Image (spheres, rainbow, N blue to C red):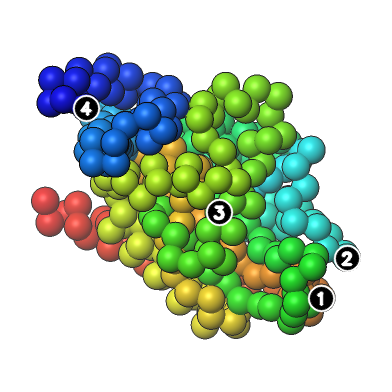
Amino acid sequence: MTALAAYFVLLIIAILSTIPPIAISVMNALFSRLRPFWAIICACALAVAITPDAAAASRRAPKRAFTLVLDAGHGGKDAGCVGRLTNEKSITLDVARRVADIVRRECPKVNVLLTRDDDRYLTLQRRADIANDAHGDLFISIHVNSVDNKSRGRESVKGTSVYALGAEKSQNTLSVAMRENAVIELEDDYTESYRGFDPHSSESYIIFELTNNLHLSQSLDFAALAHRDLVSHANRADKGVRQAGFWVLWATSMPSVLIELDFICNPRQEEFLNSENGRNLCAEAIAKAFKEYYKSQQKALARH
């Protein structure tokens, strides 16, 4: 591929970069047709160009109130992970509502928005759109973890993990992202809506690794606080703060995290997640982390 040809490829990328799904298709074509060197150069340029943060940040209007967006994972026809007593969509909605109640009561100046407040199905992109349209300042997606039915020790695995957007560090981390992203397959037109993105193909996840995430530092700051409080306050086992390629985090233009409260496939942890006390403790931990994060953000704004 000549330098002149590479120039025209980059020009096309710049034009298509306003439409991320199409851009992803272009990148997939690049990796299949170009020599490795030029494919990498073009992919890097594309990833920087299509970062949702960069495009949306310039359009964000001034706000008077801090907006917290709580996203209860799954819902409606998408039950999420299923246990013996309950399912993921029920746990996440209840915990999200409890977090909202605490924050509204203890931080009255904060605008709290739930992507869903009932048992309805929302696409991953719709969740991100709700947050972006509200000009959110922090996006928290709440989930429950599980492992494959054939996995050894599935009834003993336990622990909470909090994710920010980034490169997968292990196969286990990639598996979690793949499972959560696979909900797009419930959409009738997902092959068009998420053009070129295959939630089961590791090659598709390169877009998340190359993305220039403007809010990564703040995302990791909150992730650390939420993880700390879920471990200490809710007494969850420590599965760490991690980074992975979750579509819903990539598509939001604000600091964003995805929380896996614990493993529903473990009977003891499911009992905890299904109990009034367990859900209160998880909600209190997330709200406690938010209050500390919110205060730090307000102090930072005051200094400027």
State if disc 1 and disc 3 touch (CB < 8 Å).
Answer: no
Q: Amino acid at mark 1?
A: Pro
N-term mark: 1 or 2: 2
Q: Amino acid at mark 2?
A: Arg
The image position of residue 133, as x and y in percent, is 43, 29
- The answer to whether residue 168 is left or right of residue 46 is right
Q: Quadrant of residue 58?
A: top left
Q: Nearer the viewer, mark 3 or mark 2?
A: 3
Question: What label sits on residue 267 in the rendered view?
Answer: 1
The image position of residue 128, as x and y in percent, is 49, 36
Neighbourhood count class around disc 1 (C-alpha, 10 Å): few under 14, some 14–19, many 20 upward: some
N-term mark: 3 or 4: 4
**Residue beneath the point at 33% across and 19% down:** 16
State if disc 2 and disc 3 touch (CB < 8 Å).
Answer: no
As helix, strand or loop, the secondary structure at mark 1 comes to helix
Q: Nearer the viewer, residue 26 or 221?
A: 26
N-term mark: 3 or 2: 2
- The answer to whether residue 189 is left or right of residue 267 is left
Real-space Cα separation, disc 3 to disc 1, in angstroms: 23 Å
Residue under numbered circle 2: 84
Residue under numbered circle 3: 177
N-term mark: 3 or 1: 3
The image position of residue 131, as x and y in percent, is 47, 37
Residue under numbered circle 4: 1
**Residue beneath the point at 75% across and 42% down:** 78
